[in-house]
Image: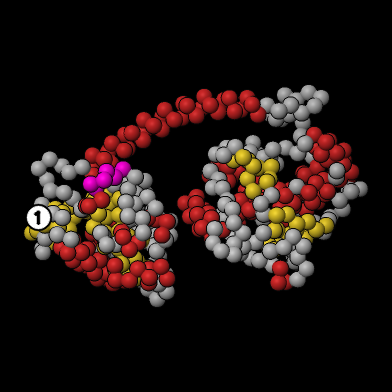
Amino acid sequence: MASSEAELTDPLLCLRTAIATNHEPLLTSTPDPSSADDAEPNLAKATHIHFNADSGHQTFPLTTDTRFSSSASNESVSFRTVYFAWLHKDDNHPVYISAAQRLNDELQQDGSAGGRIQNLPFTERMGLISFLDGSTEDTENIRPLDAQEASEQAAGSAAIASGSAGGIAPVLSAGGARAPGTVDPRLAEIYAGERKMADRNSILRGIKPTDFSHVRKQAEIFLRNSRSKTSSHAQVSNNSALVSNLKKPSGRRLEPIILLSPSASSLLRMSNIKDFLEGGFFHPADSASAGSSNTANILHTQRTMASIDSKPLRFILVDTPDQFKPDYWQRVVAVFTTGQAWQFKSYKWQTAPELFAHALGIYIGWTNEALPETVKGWGRSVKVVAVDKWSPNQGEKARWRDRAIVEEIWTAIEESMRARNWGKEGFTG
């Protein structure tokens, strides 16, 4: 099998070659596309991916198992998972995780292709992207081609290198030089046909390939045990700190809890919530000017609510209820939401109507942007406010509307707490 033929039959090589030669694949709803109507740009609804290259045409089902396997599941991942990872190659990991969750939700809807994609760990996703863009020639998560294919590709590599086979002209820009970020297709073909000698994978091989995967599996057991002991100790310490903060301090009234949305698309997260609620100034959550740390799992803020108590109330801010005890839920007075129902799956009340019957819902969006349909459907149980879009050139004076919006939010929280019988001693039922 020549290397060009392998590129037509192996999904990973086919996609790698398409990327190197700037031949964008086509998502389709049929294995044999014949018209423009067969194109389906929505990855949740597409069933096949079609490659149109100089060396030939090939179509793969998006459910095809690839040679890439994830250590998280020890199973080959689907071509849909691989292509999704490539489409989101420039996203940071939280954004990638959120996008994967949205795609999995869409795949379960009527009229979609069904199934699920795998969430690849950060290091594995980076290794896959490096392989696809030609930065590396292999990764430990990609199973090599079988011995016969490897041998036949090696036999054809000399002809490719000499120029007697392949014969693909370099891709040049209008000025005569290759466009930045592209790979010479002929060079990519030579690399695909290379036979590696005496590297760490091949040095242990004799006259035939030997599978040493069982050694790696045994080593992973010992490494996993070592890591779990370390992480468990750290988790216990973090959990203890979180639980101790949530407990009612001796001689002090119960502290109300405000839950933030864990979504990466939320405008307010742990990194910028204190600046917003205390200072009335909005910073993007991922900006350098955000005051708090993204790694914090619990924060505190104070607010005087005259209708409840003349002394300042201390509020607890968290973005996950993982360490909640059952009685903590009666102390939740507000829940920030982006309108995504998956946020409530780990809550005591897992539907929006039930949740917002016990705590005030708060949605924050950009000014002049449409309100999500889900939030509209929740009605008056959710307080809707909008902040002006952020500009790096703005000073604090230009954000004068933020303070008015913060006052709206606190007023709504105070009214909601009073309606739910919060007093000087806390929640009275």
Query: What residue is at 38 percent from the left and 70 percent from the top?
Result: 377
State the extent of the magenta-drawn residues as a range: 323-328
Q: Which residue is mark 1?
A: 424
The amino acid on which the numbered mark 1 sits, given as a three-letter code, is Lys
Query: What residue is at 32 percent from the left and 51 percent from the top?
Result: 348
Taking 143 as reference, is 323 left or right?
left
Taking 382 as reference, is 160 left or right?
right
Tell me if residue 175 comes above or below residue 120 in the rendering. below
Q: What is the quadrant of the C terminus in the image?
A: bottom left
Q: What is the quadrant of the N terminus in the image?
A: top right
Identity of the residue furthest to the left in this view: 310
Residue 415 belongs to magenta span: no
Q: Nearer the viewer, residue 411 or 45?
A: 45
Tell me if residue 166 comes above or below residue 211 in the rendering. below
Q: Nearer the viewer, residue 112 or 403?
A: 112
Taking 225 as reference, is 401 left or right?
left
Dot 1 lies on which element?
loop
> x%, y% of residue 142?
67, 40
Query: What residue is at 22 percent from the left and 52 percent from the top?
Result: 330
Residue 324 belongs to magenta span: yes
Tell me if residue 372 comes above or below residue 24 in the rendering. below
Query: Residue 322, can we see it?
Result: yes
* Among the 4 quarters of the image, the one containing residue 266: bottom left
